[in-house]
Image (spheres, helix red, strand yellow):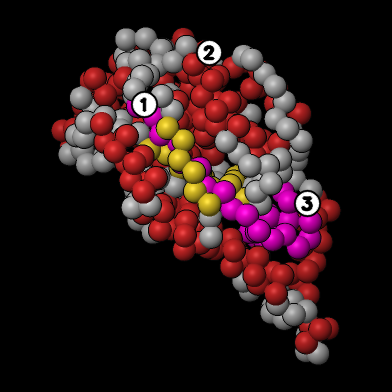
Amino acid sequence: MTLPAFDTLAALSGLADQLPVADAHAAEAARARQNSLTKPPGSLGRLEEIAEFMAAWRGTARPEIWRAQALVFAGNHGICAQGVNPYPQEVTAQMVGNFEAGGAAINQLCAANGAELSVIALDLARPTADFTEGPAMDEADCLDALWQGASAVDEGADILILGEMGIGNSTVAAALTSALFGRPAAEWVGPGTGSDKAGMTHKAEVIERGLKRHAGLIGNAPAVLAALGGREQAAICGAVLAARAARIPVILDGFICTAAASVLYATDKRLLDHCLVGHASAEPGHRKLLAAIHKRPVLEFDMRLGEGSGAALALGIVRSALACHNGMATFGEAGVSEA
């Protein structure tokens, strides 16, 4: 199905009831196949769980990945006016150029793991507003970015990898998570692109000012997205929802990407049921966030680059899970006696 149309952020709260759910019959059939393969049941650990997850969302006992789509959304942020980042905003556009030229880590990881990469720059010349002075986006701007994310999803893909790029967006991620899940901003803030201890303290102070200004929105996750988020965060939410409508499993990247998608979890926990988290970022807020949304990462490689890099790396694990699931012989096919 296609993502149902909506023209208000408040409508996000009713989407879970309109979107597909996991196919329990396909999951059960995949589990039965796992238990018939030439191995002790459960001996492939999470590879078996991932195969079952893929079966449930693709609606078939033997899912395959013929097309993996990777999307990296890029945006610029008004909060950078508060000096929260050691790099200038020009770097966002420069890195988009690097992605397009094939020179970034995400390009290599997508090539190595068989994903087709697209980079979507979201009005980089017009940063969002400074959220310490007012909402980062108005509702129309937020909805536009959300629908840009949704429209970028190829409904023919078998799996979707999501990532982001945007100078200042580690501050945005910490602001979102603090607003959505509580705890002081200092507990969510990390070094991002290289902030030192003083820089992280400053980031936390800036976020607290923003949280105070928008305190009346706490408990309204879509409104929090508009007030504190950025266009790439909204686009990630839109892509996650469009993938759900098309029954496409999603691999989220690290802290910033997961923080964006967690807006949907805070809206309705069911909205992230079709999502895996590719890795546990070295950004300190990510493990707290994973605990809050009850997600276990596929990998723990001490990465914190962003760009979708951890998600692209995790795609290789998902491919391996399905190779075992579909390619191994059953006891009967191999003529091996079962215990």
Using the numbered discs, state the Cα–Cα distance from disc 2 to disc 3 in whole angstroms. Answer: 35 Å
Q: Position of residue 117 (x, y in %)?
A: 49, 48
Rendering quarter of residue 30: bottom right
The amino acid type of the residue labelled 1 equals Leu
Q: What segment carries the magenta color?
A: 49-76
Q: Earlier in the sequence, mark 1 or mark 2?
A: 1
Q: Circle 1: is it few (<14), some (14-19), or many (20+) Cα within 10 Å?
A: some
Q: Secondary structure at mark 2?
A: helix
Which amino acid lies under the numbered mark 2 shown in the image of this protein? Ala
User: Which residue shows up at 62% across the image and 50% down it?
Assistant: 159
Corner quadrant of residue 319: bottom right
Q: Position of residue 105 (x, y in %)?
A: 36, 54
Above or below, 7 against 324 in this view is above
Residue 58 lies in the magenta stretch: yes
Instruction: Inspect the magenta stretch and tell me whether residue 175 lies in it.
Output: no
Label tally: 3
Q: Please give left or right for residue 313 compared with residue 323 in the image.
A: left
Give the quarter of the image for residue 28.
bottom right
Disc 3/disc 1 C-alpha distance (Å)? 38 Å
Give how far across and how far down residue 174 sits, in percent: 37, 31
Residue 124 x/y as whole percent: 36, 26
The earlier-in-sequence mark between 2 and 3 is 3
The CA span between labels 1 and 2 is 17 Å
Which mark is drawn over residue 124? 1
- Which residue shows up at 53% across the image and 60% down it? 114
- Residue at the outermost front position: 101
Which of labels 3 and 1 is toward the front? 1
SS type, badge 1:
loop
Q: Give the class, few, some or many, for how many residues have Cα within 10 Å of label 3's Cα (few <14, many ≥20).
A: some
**Residue designated by label 3:** 59
Image-based side of 189 in relation to 59, left or right: left
Quadrant into which the C terminus falls? bottom right
